[in-house]
Image (cartoon, rainbow, N blue to C red):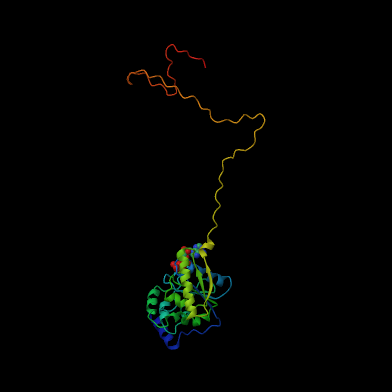
């Protein structure tokens, strides 16, 4: 830690974080799903960007996933302004996320970047009493500076996700329609019920969605195949030939005369073609065709 960071830390401990409460009252939305890769981060970033850029709201994105994909999606490294990251802030006392919130390139959109040590933070938190309340307490001041706070949760129902659900007013659940995906939605909704019954009675479900399905193209129509022409059906007309009857049975072939003993193959004349008749026996009458 540099000398400046040490001084800033000392000042914060002595006189508090030095952030005045704002005049807003943010709605906090946790974007959560137990299954990975269902679009939590994409939904968080796109929704936040739309609310800031199109609706002029002041939005804070909080990346609670150690993968840090919110910063990747924003194509900008969201470094905290103090020496501490999100993990230290969640473990500290009387700290607020507003201390490390940083503006992004989009007007009105702010972000609290992830921390690669968040997994370790989670295991340290798990031994604490009241661990589920850590994020709610750390959002007290941040809530007063923003209109909407969107929390991108990790793909599990561990302490960090539970603390996001305890801090949130609503939860948004992206999902896919696979068996495992729907199983994960069931598990999450059960967790929401439990949290509603205990730590956060006001928690509502904003919606369940299949973001990847919405963007999928409709299936292309099958290429048209040329069908073989159907024979035209019509009744017999005057002058038509009679339809062919059943095939006539031909007379059984006569038994071939016993073959004359032939010369050995190497002495015989070149073999005749199979469709050429054998020469008539001497003295036989040959009918003119
Ligand atoms: N609406 C969408 N349309 C098309 N692709 C999408 C959409 N939403 C997400 N994706 C893609 O799906 C993949 C996973 O998305 P994303 O990272 O947002 O999921 P996640 O739930 O945050 O994953 P993780 O659980 O690993 O954090 C990404 O490649 C992303 O580009
Ligand atoms: Mg993600």
Q: Nearer the viewer, residue 258 or 202?
A: 258
Visible in this render: residue 72? no
Query: Which residue lies at the image location 46% right of the left edge and 66% below the top edge?
Result: 181
Q: Between residue 93 and residue 284, name the one nearer to us.
A: 284
Q: Position of residue 252 (x, y in %)?
A: 47, 25
For residue 142, above or below residue 259: below
Q: Left of 145 or right of it: where is 14?
A: left
Residue 224, percent from left and from top: 56, 47
Name the spot of residue 283 as percent of width and height, x first.
44, 11
Regarding residue 132, the answer to whether it shows in the image is: yes
Considering the image in quadrants, where does the N terminus appear?
bottom left
Q: Quadrant of residue 51?
A: bottom right
Would residue 11 appear left or right of 261 to someone viewing this image? right
* Towards the viewer: 69 or 169: 169
Image quadrant where residue 93 sits: bottom left
Name the residue: 52% across, 65% down. Answer: 211
Q: State the image quarter where residue 227 is shown.
A: top right
Residue sticking out furthest to the right? 238
């Amino acid at each position: 830690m540099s000398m400046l960071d040490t001084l800033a830390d000392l000042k914060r401990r002595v006189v508090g974080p030095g952030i005045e409460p704002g005049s807003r009252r943010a709605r906090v939305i946790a974007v959560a799903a137990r299954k990975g890769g269902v679009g939590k981060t994409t939904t968080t970033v796109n929704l936040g960007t739309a609310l800031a850029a199109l609706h002029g709201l002041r939005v804070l994105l909080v990346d609670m996933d150690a993968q840090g994909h919110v910063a990747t999606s924003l194509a900008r490294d969201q470094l905290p302004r103090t020496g501490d990251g999100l993990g230290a802030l969640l473990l500290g006392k009387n700290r607020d996320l507003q201390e490390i919130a940083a503006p992004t390139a989009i007007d009105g959109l702010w972000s609290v970047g992830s921390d690669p040590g968040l997994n370790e933070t989670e295991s340290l938190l798990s031994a604490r009493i009241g661990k589920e309340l850590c994020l709610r307490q750390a959002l007290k001041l941040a809530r007063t500076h923003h209109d909407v706070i969107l929390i991108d949760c990790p793909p599990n129902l561990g302490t960090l996700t539970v603390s996001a659900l305890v801090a949130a007013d609503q939860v948004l659940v992206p999902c896919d329609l696979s068996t495992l995906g729907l199983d994960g939605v069931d598990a999450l909704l059960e967790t929401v019920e439990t949290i509603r019954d205990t730590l956060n009675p006001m928690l509502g479900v904003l919606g369940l969605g299949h973001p990847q399905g919405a963007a999928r193209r409709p299936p292309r129509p099958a290429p048209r195949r040329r069908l073989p022409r159907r024979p035209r059906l019509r009744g017999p007309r005057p002058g038509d030939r009679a339809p062919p009857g059943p095939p006539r049975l031909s007379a059984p072939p006569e038994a071939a005369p016993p073959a004359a003993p032939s010369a050995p193959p190497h002495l015989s004349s070149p073999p005749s073609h199979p469709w050429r008749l054998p020469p008539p026996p001497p003295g036989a009458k040959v009918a003119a065709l």
